Amino acid sequence: NAGVTQTPKFQVLKTGQSMTLQCAQDMNHNSMYWYRQDPGMGLRLIYYSASEGTTDKGEVPNGYNVSRLNKREFSLRLESAAPSQTSVYFCASIKQENQPQHFGDGTRLSIL
Amino acid sequence: GNSVTQMEGPVTLSEEAFLTINCTYTATGYPSLFWYVQYPGEGLQLLLKATKADDKGSNKGFEATYRKETTSFHLEKGSVQVSDSAVYFCALILPYQGAQKLVFGQGTRLTINP
């Protein structure tokens, strides 16, 4: 099925470890986004990529980096994981303005 | 600033009850409005949308009307089912630094008992 695919689905890290969350979409969408979801706070935008070759900070970018590898793929990297980064991470994509975003199933990340 | 406020949950109802989940927003201009649903262990799925004032979005028996005068987009369903148990997010979409972003409410957890 077409859509947004995130890997891994679950991950447990120790404080200070690094890892990369992968996201790929096969809908030929231009813009891609990374959000984190925390209890009682809805979703908050970490980084986004308006088009291939561009990335920009969202509301909560500290501690993260991103790479828009090509039009399909947009990865999120934690260089030195901290317990405050324990969350559920969602990738989303959109083709054009004012259209709804399509979401992946999420990556549940725990930092011990 | 731009924000979305939803009624606090959790909300627990019996099957076939009437559902209302309130949503109000603050935004410059006239954003498009959305309701997303998140089932346990899954990502967010678009439930319905409205792009201008007085539009009514509907899907799977759910409805919401874009009310500019009250800046509201309340979600309603006449007869809920156990399968409607999920977390519901109200959201608006805004231009953001050359792209766009969704601004979400905090979510309302709905549980339907048989």
Image: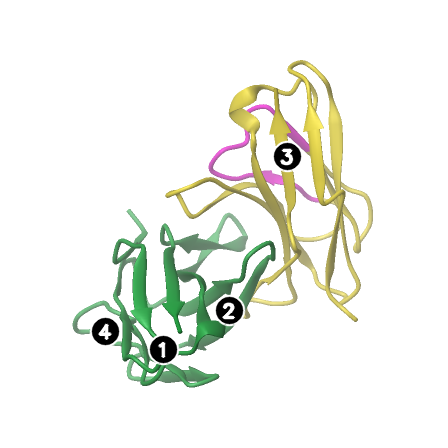
Chain colours: A yellow, B green
Q: Mark 1, residues whose alpha carbon is within 10 Å: few (<14), some, or many (≥20)?
A: some
Q: Residues within 10 Å of mark 4 (few under 14, many from 20)?
A: few
What residue did someone put label 2 on? A98
User: Identity of the amino acid at label 2?
Assistant: Asn
Amino acid type of the residue tagged 1 in the rendering: Glu
Q: Which stretch appears magenta?
A: A54-65
Q: Give the residue pinned by disc 1.
A: B15
Query: Which of disc 4 and disc 1 is earlier in sequence?
Result: 1
Q: Chain of mark 3?
A: A
Q: Is residue A61 magenta?
A: yes
Residue sitting nearer the eye, B109 or A68: B109
Main SS, magenta residues: loop
Q: Nearer the viewer, residue B84 or A71?
A: B84
Q: CA distance from mark 4 to mark 2?
A: 17 Å
* Badge 3 and badge 2 in a common chain: yes
In the image, what residue occupies the spot 33% across and 68% down?
B30
Nearer the observer: mark 1 or 2; the answer is 1
| Left or right of A18, for residue B66 | left
Question: What secondary structure is marked by label 2?
Answer: loop
| Front residue (pair B73, A39) | A39
Residue lying at 66% horizontally and 41% vertically, measured from the top left: A55
The local secondary structure at tag 4 comes to loop
Point out the tag, 3 or 2, that comes first from the N-terminus: 2
Question: Are the residues tagged 1 and 4 within 8 Å (C-beta)?
Answer: no
Tag 3 secondary structure: strand
